[in-house]
Amino acid sequence: MSRPAIRTAVVPASGILGLRWEVLRPGLPREAAVFPEDADPAAFHVAAYEADAGEGAPVLGCATFFPDPFPGAAATAYRFRGMASAPAARGRGFGAAVLRAGTAEAAARGAGLLWCNGRTEARGFYERHGFAVHGGEFVIEGVGPHLVFVKEIGGGGGSAGRGDAPDRA
């Protein structure tokens, strides 16, 4: 099966809330999918869609990126959370597209480091995208086992991720 052409865009938090709620907070009130970082003016949200889908197309992948220092690192760091792919879109490149676009945007905003608390079961995905595990496994209550993943990226708007930058919505 060929991979679909994928379009990414920086969108308001409201544009990804539905997918975030469906995938990451099922069975909980919709408000459980609203993160404190959504209100941070320096945060940005990346959505992924089928490239040929028109206005109002469903979001098939998403994540939220925001400045958050990484302990012990001198570089400007961005953290991401709320990364999700629609169940029907898993394994089709939407998560990878969101990660590439978010990495490019964070680098353009001056980040030299990107990190997250990722589900342990997603370790292979993050490692395939150049992230390394930092420290040991820990459990987030009500969510499950996680690891810290970290990756150095080219900050200052250099060539990192050129061609993968998201559109502006």
Image (cartoon, rainbow, N blue to C red):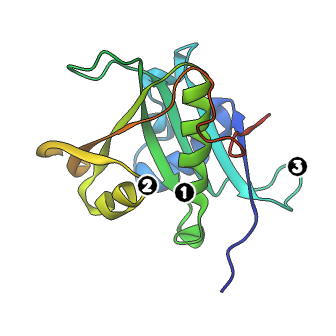
Q: Residue at x 46, y 38 (%)?
A: 33
Q: CA distance from mark 2 to mark 3?
A: 30 Å
Q: Residues within 10 Å of mark 1 (few under 14, many from 20)?
A: some
Q: Quadrant of residue 71?
A: top left
Q: Secondary structure at mark 1?
A: helix
Q: Residue at x 43, y 54 (%)?
A: 129
Q: Position of residue 161 (x, y in %)?
A: 61, 42
Task: Relative to 16, say whether 42 is above or below.
Answer: above
Q: Secondary structure at mark 2?
A: loop
Q: Residues within 10 Å of mark 3 (few under 14, many from 20)?
A: few
* Residue hosting label 3: 55
Q: Secondary structure at mark 3?
A: loop
> Could you tell me the amino acid type at mark 1?
Ala
Q: Looking at the image, is mark 1 or mark 3 earlier in the sequence?
A: 3
Cβ atoms at labels 2 and 3 below 8 Å apart: no
Task: Relative to 88, say whether 111 is above or below.
Answer: above
Q: Nearer the viewer, mark 2 or mark 3?
A: 2
* Residue hosting label 2: 129
User: In the image, 107: left or right of 60?
Assistant: left
Instruction: Classify the position of the N terminus by image quarter.
Output: bottom right
- Which disc number belongs to residue 96? 1
Q: Looking at the image, is mark 2 or mark 1 earlier in the sequence?
A: 1
Cβ atoms at labels 2 and 1 below 8 Å apart: yes
Q: CA distance from mark 1 to mark 3?
A: 22 Å
Frontmost residue, 162 versus 137: 162
> Could you tell me the amino acid type at mark 2?
His
> Could you tell me the amino acid type at mark 3?
Glu
Q: Position of residue 141 (x, y in %)?
A: 18, 42
Task: Relative to 18, say whether 158 is above or below.
Answer: above
